[in-house]
Image (cartoon, grey):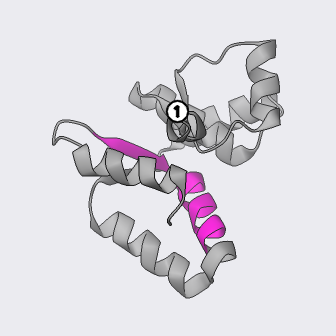
C-alpha cells in the first residue's frame, strides 16, 4: 500500500522460500479486510483479500482448537479478539506472531506477563 510497513511485507513475501509458511486466523483475515476497506473501500478490500488467498502463500487457520485458545487468551488478557487469534495461531503453528504496530494494550499485557510466542512488530522492521 505504499507505506514503510507495506514495503517490509512485500519484501518478506518476495523472498519467501517454499519451505516457509505463513498462517492467518479467520479473525486476522477479517481485520485485514476491515483495514483495507477503511482505506480504499469494500471492492478494493475484496480484491486484495482474494489476491492473498489465491496466492496460496497464506494458509488460513480455522480449527476448533484455535477458537478455544483464542477465547482463553481473551479471557486472560485485555487485548482485542483479533490479537488473541494471532497469538493463538502462532502458538498452534509454533511460529512468530506478527503485528503491524506496537499497540498500547498489547505492550501493557506484554509487560504484565510475557506471551509464550515470539512477537514481531513490522513498524520496528520498517524503521530500520
Q: Between 5 and 17, which is closer to the camera in this rendering?
A: 5
Residue 114 visible in rendering: yes
Residue 42 on the magenta span:
no
Q: Position of residue 95 (x, y in %)?
A: 41, 28
Q: Can you say whether 12 is above or below 118 in the image?
A: below
Disc 1 target residue? 97
Q: Position of residue 2 (x, y in %)?
A: 50, 65
- Residue 96, given in percent of the width and then of the height, sits at 46, 28
Q: Nearer the viewer, residue 77 or 6?
A: 6
Element class at badge 1: strand
Residues rendered magenta in the picture: 21-36
From the viewer's perspective, is residue 69 above or below residue 23?
above
Residue farthest toward the front in the current orientation of the protein: 128
Pick out the residue farthest to the bottom: 43
Q: How many marks?
A: 1
Query: Where's residue 123, x and y in %?
Result: 59, 40
Looking at the image, which residue is at 37% across and 54% down?
10
Estimate how packed mark 1 is, as few (under 14), some (14 to 19) or many (20 or more) residues with alpha carbons within 10 Å.
many
Q: Nearer the viewer, residue 125 or 41?
A: 125
Q: Which image quadrant for residue 33?
A: bottom right
Say whether residue 60 is visible.
Answer: no
Query: With 71 as the anchor, is 44 left or right in this view?
Result: left
Residue at 56 percent of width and 37 percent of height: 127
Q: Magenta-highlighted stretch: main secondary structure?
A: helix
Q: Is residue 65 above or below residue 46?
A: above
Q: Is residue 31 magenta?
A: yes
Amino acid at each position: 500500500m505504499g507505506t514503510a510497513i507495506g514495503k517490509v511485507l512485500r519484501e518478506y513475501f518476495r523472498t519467501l522460500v517454499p519451505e516457509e509458511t505463513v498462517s492467518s486466523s479467520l479473525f486476522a483475515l477479517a481485520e485485514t479486510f476491515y483495514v483495507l476497506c477503511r482505506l480504499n473501500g469494500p471492492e478494493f478490500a475484496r480484491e486484495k483479500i482474494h489476491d492473498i488467498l489465491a496466492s496460496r502463500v497464506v494458509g488460513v487457520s480455522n480449527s476448533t482448537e484455535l477458537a478455544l485458545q483464542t477465547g482463553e487468551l481473551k479471557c486472560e488478557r485485555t487485548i482485542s479478539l483479533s490479537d488473541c487469534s494471532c497469538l493463538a495461531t502462532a502458538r498452534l503453528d509454533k511460529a512468530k506472531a506478527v503485528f503491524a504496530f506496537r499497540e498500547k494494550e498489547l505492550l501493557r499485557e506484554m509487560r504484565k506477563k510475557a506471551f509464550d510466542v515470539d512477537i514481531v512488530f513490522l513498524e520496528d522492521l520498517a524503521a530500520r
